[in-house]
Image (tube, coloured by chain):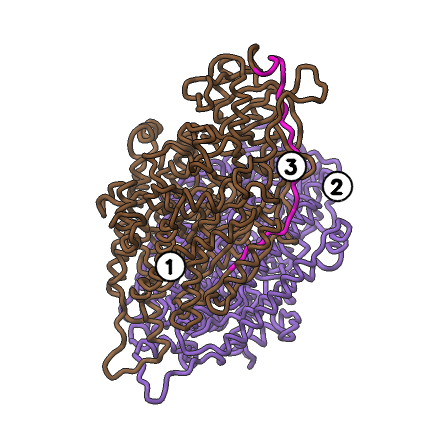
Chain colours: A purple, B brown
Amino acid sequence: MKWQWQVLGAVCGGALLLGAGILLGHFAVPRAGGGRDPPRWLQDASGDLDEKLIQDVMGQVESARIRENLRVLASRPHLATTPGDRALVQLLRQRWQDPQTGLDGAAEGTYDVLLSFPDPKRPNSVSVCPPVLNGSRLFESQRSEKALTPDQAQEDVVPPYAAYAPSGSPQGRLVYAHQGTRSDYETLVGRGLDLNGTIAIVRYGGAGRATKAVVGAEFGVAGLVVYTDPKDINDGRAGENDTYPNSWHLPPSGVERGSYTESFGDLLTPYHPAKGTAYDAPGHPGIPPIPTQPIGFEDARTLICSLAGPEAPAAWQGALGCTYHTGPGFRMDGRFPSSSEVQVSVYNQRVIKKSANVMGFIRGSQEPDRYVLYGNHRDSWVHGAVDPGSGTAVMLEITRVLGKMLKEGTWRPRRSIIFGSWGAEEFGLIGSTEYTEEFSSKLQARSVAYINVDISVFGGSFCTSLYPSNPCGQHAVPFAVPAPGSGTGSVYDNWRHHTNRSSPTYGVIPSLGSLGAGSDYASFIHYLGITSMDLAYTYDRSQTSARIYPAYHTAFDTFDYTDRFIDPGFTSHQAVARTAGNVLLRLADSLVLPLNVSDYGEALEGLYSVAAQGQVQADLVAHNISLAPLKVAIDRFKTIAADFNQRVMKLKEDPLEVRMVNDQIMLLERAFLDPRAFPNKYYYSHVLWAPRAAGVPTFPGLAEAHAAGDWDAVRKHLSIATQAVESAASTLEPPA
Amino acid sequence: MKWQWQVLGAVCGGALLLGAGILLGHFAVPRAGGGRDPPRWLQDASGDLDEKLIQDVMGQVESARIRENLRVLASRPHLATTPGDRALVQLLRQRWQDPQTGLDGAAEGTYDVLLSFPDPKRPNSVSVCPPVLNGSRLFESQRSEKALTPDQAQEDVVPPYAAYAPSGSPQGRLVYAHQGTRSDYETLVGRGLDLNGTIAIVRYGGAGRATKAVVGAEFGVAGLVVYTDPKDINDGRAGENDTYPNSWHLPPSGVERGSYTESFGDLLTPYHPAKGTAYDAPGHPGIPPIPTQPIGFEDARTLICSLAGPEAPAAWQGALGCTYHTGPGFRMDGRFPSSSEVQVSVYNQRVIKKSANVMGFIRGSQEPDRYVLYGNHRDSWVHGAVDPGSGTAVMLEITRVLGKMLKEGTWRPRRSIIFGSWGAEEFGLIGSTEYTEEFSSKLQARSVAYINVDISVFGGSFCTSLYPSNPCGQHAVPFAVPAPGSGTGSVYDNWRHHTNRSSPTYGVIPSLGSLGAGSDYASFIHYLGITSMDLAYTYDRSQTSARIYPAYHTAFDTFDYTDRFIDPGFTSHQAVARTAGNVLLRLADSLVLPLNVSDYGEALEGLYSVAAQGQVQADLVAHNISLAPLKVAIDRFKTIAADFNQRVMKLKEDPLEVRMVNDQIMLLERAFLDPRAFPNKYYYSHVLWAPRAAGVPTFPGLAEAHAAGDWDAVRKHLSIATQAVESAASTLEPPA
């Protein structure tokens, strides 16, 4: 998973409303009775979801098998395209082609994609050079994490690095720039600090990885060091006794690796599958222009606690056990001579490598040309037990249970199901993006939904809430799944207890996050407009301020870590498997798609209400811009959606009529796509869910134009939003 | 019809292959027999086209009724949004709502669109000013055409003007610039002529109307005069005895009006329906920057035959009865003092007006959410008997025949049929474009095809060939329609006799033109990727070199003109009505869509073969660019298409299976759309049929990049084309 700080903090989700509880049960199509004897295919075509099947499947999901899956998956490092990754390709294929528990088929799809690796012969480092250069070093960062369990000592553990950061060895005085956001750098400049030629050390969080470097370079920073502050990840704990293997906290030597790109998909071939035939686009968008290297907080402490200069602002202080100063350079009485400089030495190499997706298929019995997609990436930074093993272990358990029924001949879904084990996600969602590029026409015309389960369980022993980043989906399914742990409630109860909002229609319901570009759903929702959701169990945020689970992207994200701290007993994994499997089956088997179009009206109303109040509204009034046409369109949408639901209630037995209604439901999300709305943002075409300037959770084009004070663009994006809503509404009208 | 010179001259068409004769007959789905008694809806859902119905409909199409339709339609001028146009809106609604012969319903859709009209109080003119300006004029162009029949004397005849040309009264020395192409202006400059501040007189043809002015302005031309040379339109005949009302030739006072824009759709709201809510895009793309005025050849003779300067090149000479010189200015011994200057006085006004489309609907019985569209514009420049009356007269006869069966309860199509009477086409295909913008999602998801019949009969008494601008469609339908006139052959025979090509699959077959932006199909095919065709009967090009029928866009395009010269007896109109009605019924009623996907392989092969030979191939080799991936993709497409047709042959009785196959056929065209392929061309997204640099009829992006010598762009567009072909092929694979 490519973690983005926004994901958990954001407000609104990315897709159609999954209101299974609302629609299901009303549409069991009456079979032809009396003297008639309709052909077998007709009975099949009119068959609805079998609730008993759902119960069966949920009952068959075993936590022990998920645990065993994870043990195998995380047994060795499997960085994209390395031998460990290729071994898992074989594992996936073998599982999905198993004669007893496999699917109808499995296949590999490969792409030639641009990756970035450290040079095994010339290790990257962050070092302190003496004032008189003589080749010696006063300090050098650790080349790898400490071997606290046997896992870290395995071969193929890639040393910490910032993928795609360019090679180079800039040297300069060190400054501390907090999180490396624009305002952080501005603060330093505002204090009179000249950033030109400096090496900046910043901590993770607050901005995307690449952005820290891209923006830093704008301010003249020559090299970047990134570390994880114990305050942000460990609730302040930094000692060896308080950290893994003694707790789930990050050890002092742990380093978060990551992809340092601002965009996603193969960098050479935007919008085109990275096949031999693809055109290499000139320029690589969103790659840091300066050498960049991540380090652990043990090393960061040595550097930051020696800094000279004024004290950093209170909000910039962390948990390294000293007062943070901004620099530049080291203080007189510290560990290093005050004129010592820091050198960032990076020897990363960009190479084109063949990366594989493994695809598994179940052919639909009635509507083979309707696809329910379910996926997760396969590649990891090191062992990737949580990221992505926890998701793959769940996926393999779901496919085992379904595969068994399939091979026994007791079940075949109405619609086709496609499972994807994506490659090279950690480098920028590459496998899934190339897949959506290669099959864009087909996927856009036929996909009912995409379910992503990447990290399935974020949490420690206090797992408590379900986290599907979909503005809906909250109703029927989680009711049916018992919550893990000692309680007696459902996943739904647990979820709503921890994060909720008040819905005009449903009362207090679980609230949902937004789908940014944090995992492989990105190209499905943003590029193709396919209804998407992302499911996970996560920890209780009232109990910890950890930015994410502490071993994220380090050599400590191991089976042992998961087994002992993330989910002992694997009951949270089991709950996610049951929930995701349940959603999958309902999407694949329900006669009428279990997605309630009316819930989208509520989402639109939510986006609108933000624009219709406060500063946005005041600014619009001041510039004589009316929201009335948008409001009219949303009201019309709501009326038409309600009428649509009424008509669905009265559906007759005709499979063609059911198909027509399902096409309207399936394609509603597509009506919100406008490939010309955001011409400068790769892949982002969704008028409602594209990224937007932080702080104002309304229509993204409107939010960004408002934030930029560009009133012409505000008018344009209001027009785009209004048209999208009107166009979407018209797709729900009676077709003739 | 917005005439574009390329249309008849171009080579390749714009849409899916209509191979009705190939597919039809194979797919009559067997009804359930024996002891079974399937429900009525199932019998209906599996019902195929009734060939007898086709014969009935063709038999009911009456030439006399088409003639009478045209008499009414062309009884008064009906420029867009004028009272004459609004009267026809009522007529259309009345016909389509008629209790005996109407459709299921009719409705108006209105848009607030930017039009351009001359000022009734200040007539535009082209005049010659004396050397000493005293307000007098040595010559002034005629303000309107001569009243040769009562029609020209009717009120509401709009004086000749160049719509959207800006107001102004530039004055300068006159130069003759042939057709006003870039190379024409370059020729003059190459001869040492300084074009700055000149008034250029150019003739129609060779470049789009607006382009003559846009390019002229680049060379410093201050004002433009455009006329129709008798050589280009009248086979050289220029005398009153040789012209209308004595023949079909253009009278000396006749002036071709037209829209002077390079793009289409409402100029203020590209990609957005011109509703009150739409954002007004800044800048109006493709409008001439200089005052421009069209005149008749009688007036042009006065000007051109007085020019000084060297003789114009031989190819620039025309049929005005004198040797054409280039100027600048008038010669010493001519009609005007040699230092006289020409003034172009234009008082056009741009105004936003409410323009209506009239839409008529027939609800489909089985698949109401599948649309077969049929349309023509309603607005004309003056009486518009040929353009667009001849098409509307045909459409009204088709809707009468279908409406009658509908009201009698003897017929209802399988799929829905939508008829469109578009507004403001003459100003730039505005009504149809706004319609496709407003309903883009719905139309893209559900439209089977769009049939355009604008000018239905171009020809005089020597009408001989059918002209559907679709690379296919040639097989079954025209066989069945008898050719008009004395011969005994079919429309097909006639067509193939006059224009043909050799197909690897079918032998010698009629050849087809390309769909540019000449009529309302443009936004359907280029913007939405909907299979489109344009049908017309036209004259024998071996008998006349007329650029188009001579009265085009003049006040002589009247009922009398049509009745006496274009199609006495209206048998050609009848043949078009039968052909178009036949195609329409097959698309609406056939169980399996009568479009042969394999024929697209032949079209791809044709585009490819042009790139794989001659100069293009040599240049690609020289730049180390391989066509092999494209060739592989095309070969794969052909194999998959052939397999698809094999599977279609074996289709079972299941309506869902038939629907799936039809979805694949319907959406194939959409797979060739890439909204990011031509970011600088409004609306053009079709990777195969977008406009291209003239001369090399291959993939348009490749052709343009090659013509520009931009090898990076060549690589990019090869990649785009290859991906489009691969993506399209994959949509034809078995869906699961």
Instruction: Residue B101 in the image: state x and y as whole percent.
Output: 46, 66
| Segment tinted magenta in the rendering | B335-359
In whole angstroms, how far apart are the C-alphas of marks 2 and 1? Answer: 92 Å
Q: Is residue B592 above or below residue B424?
A: below
> B711 or B2: nearer the eye?
B2
Q: Which residue is mark 3?
A: B348
Instruction: Residue B258 in the image: state x and y as whole percent.
Output: 54, 38
Query: Which one is in front in this view, the residue at disc 3 or the one at disc 1?
Result: 1
Q: Secondary structure at mark 2?
A: loop
Q: Which mark is residue B61?
A: 1
Tell me, yes or no, if residue A83 can be seen here: no
Q: Secondary structure at mark 1?
A: loop
Q: Secondary structure at mark 3?
A: loop
Q: Which residue is mark 2?
A: A310
Confirm whether the magenta stretch covers residue B351.
Answer: yes
Q: Amino acid at mark 1?
A: Val
In whole angstroms, how far apart are the C-alphas of marks 3 and 1? Answer: 43 Å
Q: Amino acid at mark 3?
A: Asn
Instruction: Residue B166 in the image: state x and y as whole percent.
Output: 63, 34
Q: Is residue B83 above or below residue A50?
A: above
What kind of secondary structure does the magenta stretch mostly adopt? strand
Packing grade of label 2 (10 A; few <14, some 14-19, many >=20) is: few
> A187 or B145: nearer the eye?
B145
Circles 3, 1 touching at the beta carbon (< 8 Å): no
> A169 or B427: nearer the eye?
B427
Q: Say which chain tag 1 marks.
A: B
Which quarter of the rendering shows the C terminus of chain B? bottom left
Q: Say which chain tag 2 marks.
A: A
Packing grade of label 3 (10 A; few <14, some 14-19, many >=20) is: many
Q: Is residue B199 above or below residue B25?
A: above
Q: Amino acid at mark 2?
A: Pro
Query: Which one is in front in this view, the residue at disc 2 or the one at disc 1?
Result: 1
